[in-house]
Image (cartoon, grey):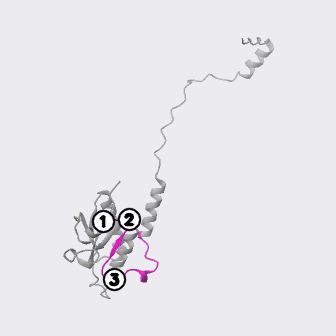
Amino acid sequence: MRKKPAPLSHEESDLFRSAVADVRPLESDRLPVAPPPPPPLPQKRQEDERQVLQDMLSDPEYPELLETGEELLFARSGLQHGVLRKLRRGQYAISAELDLHGLTAAEARQQLAAFLSACRQRDLRCVRIIHGKGNGSLQRRPVLKGKVNHWLQQRDEVLAFCSARPADGGTGAIYVLLKRMT
């Protein structure tokens, strides 16, 4: 059994009253409702996207090591050979096209980044990019071809690309296979 506390003496009661004399009762005994926390920010994803943009705006460290042959060909590791073979044969339907003729390298880089972002948002799978053969350049060599090759390899959403069939622009254009949206 629990013992009852001894009653307070007159002196203890006066001491307590003087200690709490300035205390005011609360208007409400409920805690204020806090607003919900803001949704979490995907910081790593934003950091990755900033890095991709920075990489897209950079030129290759060693431009002399870039492929200089006529045909462009690139595939991410793990891509099935049959998929690449169908891409090279032009057997995928082209969903969109970007023509970079007459643009400077900086303009082409921006157009390419915007085009790929738009394609990604629309969940397009196969697109064609026309970079030209360089016949209009001063050295009569392709200027944008090597740069497009470099820029596309830096883009995570690009699974593969290859030079187009002659009917679709030949070595002056490429087919690009993009990842599916997940």
Is residue 104 visible to the viewer in this orientation of the structure? yes
Q: Nearer the viewer, mark 3 or mark 2?
A: 2
> x, y percentage for residue 112?
33, 69
Q: Nearer the viewer, mark 1 or mark 2?
A: 2
What kind of residue is marked 3?
A: Gly
Comparing 60 with 69, the one in front is 69
Q: Which residue is mark 3?
A: 69
Task: Label the magenta part by its dominant secondary structure.
Answer: loop
The residue lying furthest to the left in this view is 167
Give the alpha-carbon distance from disc 3 to disc 1, as whole Å.
21 Å
Tell me, yes or no, whether the highlighted magenta stretch contains residue 123: no
Residue 45 quadrant: bottom left
Tell me, yes or no, whether the highlighted magenta stretch contains residue 77: yes
Give the alpha-carbon distance from disc 3 to disc 2, as whole Å.
24 Å
> x, y percentage for residue 119?
30, 61
56 relative position to 7: left or right: left
Give the alpha-carbon distance from disc 1 to disc 2, as whole Å.
14 Å
For residue 17, the mark is: none
Q: Which residue is mark 1?
A: 177
Query: Which comes sooner in the sequence, label 1 or label 2?
Result: 2
Q: State the quadrant of the N terminus.
A: top right
Badge 3 vs badge 2, beta-carbon distance below 8 Å: no
Q: Label 1: state its secondary structure.
A: strand
Is residue 128 visible to the viewer in this orientation of the structure? no
For disc 1, the neighbor class at 10 Å (few under 14, some 14 to 19, many from 20) is many
For residue 78, the mark is: 2
> x, y percentage for residue 49?
43, 61
Residue 137 drawn above or below residue 51 = below
What kind of residue is marked 1?
A: Leu
Magenta part of the chain: 56-81
What kind of residue is marked 2?
A: Gly
Residue placed at 39% from the left, 70% from the top? 153
